[in-house]
Amino acid sequence: MRLTFRVLPTLLPLALVAAGFAQPAPDATTEIQAVLSRQAADWNRGDMDAFAKSYKNSPDILFMGDPPKRGYAAMLDRYKTRYPSREAMGILHFSNLTVHPLDAHFATTTGNFHLDRSASGGGNADGYFLLVLEKTSDGWKIICDDTTATPPAHK
């Protein structure tokens, strides 16, 4: 009997986890969705530098475009050039987010974006994206961004 009572305190926490009473750690999908939610909030505050912190600060990140750019500094410069003012930035919305974990350290995410902007800010813009993210010591970071704007519909 004594052995049973000594083992019980050790096994009880494991039993509670197995029974579902303990909270599991957030999974990649939840964590990556939170990264994109923060990114949209930073954009919508007009804080381009905070928005860019969702990208890995590395010379190796890849931002697809015409032409493709490598490196954190080039990515940030591209954003600041294309969106030089709050009016040009507009209000960013993400939708249809789908996270595909590849392993414990990498995942892809697809989705759509919409920018609400005035005509003088460039007008509304829509498109879709494919991101590759890496789990770093600072959390999930974008290492490759392939974003495509859809052409405006002809009236």
Image (tube, helix red, strand yellow):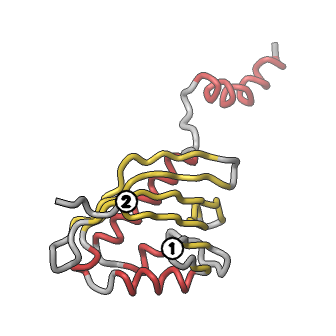
Q: Position of residue 155 (x, y in %)?
A: 16, 59
Disc assigned to residue 83: none
* Residue at (39, 85) in percent of width and height: 80
* Residue at (54, 85) in percent of width and height: 74
C-alpha separation, residue under disc 2 versus residue under disc 1: 13 Å
**Residue that lies at the very extreme toward the right in this rendered image:** 3
Residue carrying label 1: 65
Label 2 is placed on what type of residue? Gly
Sequence-first tag of 2 and 1: 1
Q: Is residue 1 left or right of residue 17?
A: right
Residue carrying label 2: 127
Foreground: 148 or 15?
A: 148
Q: Position of residue 84 (x, y in %)?
A: 32, 86
Label 1 is placed on what type of residue? Gly
Foreground: 13 or 4?
A: 13
Q: Position of residue 120 (x, y in %)?
A: 16, 80
Q: Is residue 101 above or below residue 45?
A: above
* Residue at (53, 66) in percent of width and height: 145
Residue 60 falls in image quadrant: bottom right
Q: Is residue 45 above or below residue 17?
A: below
* Residue at (65, 65) in percent of width and height: 137
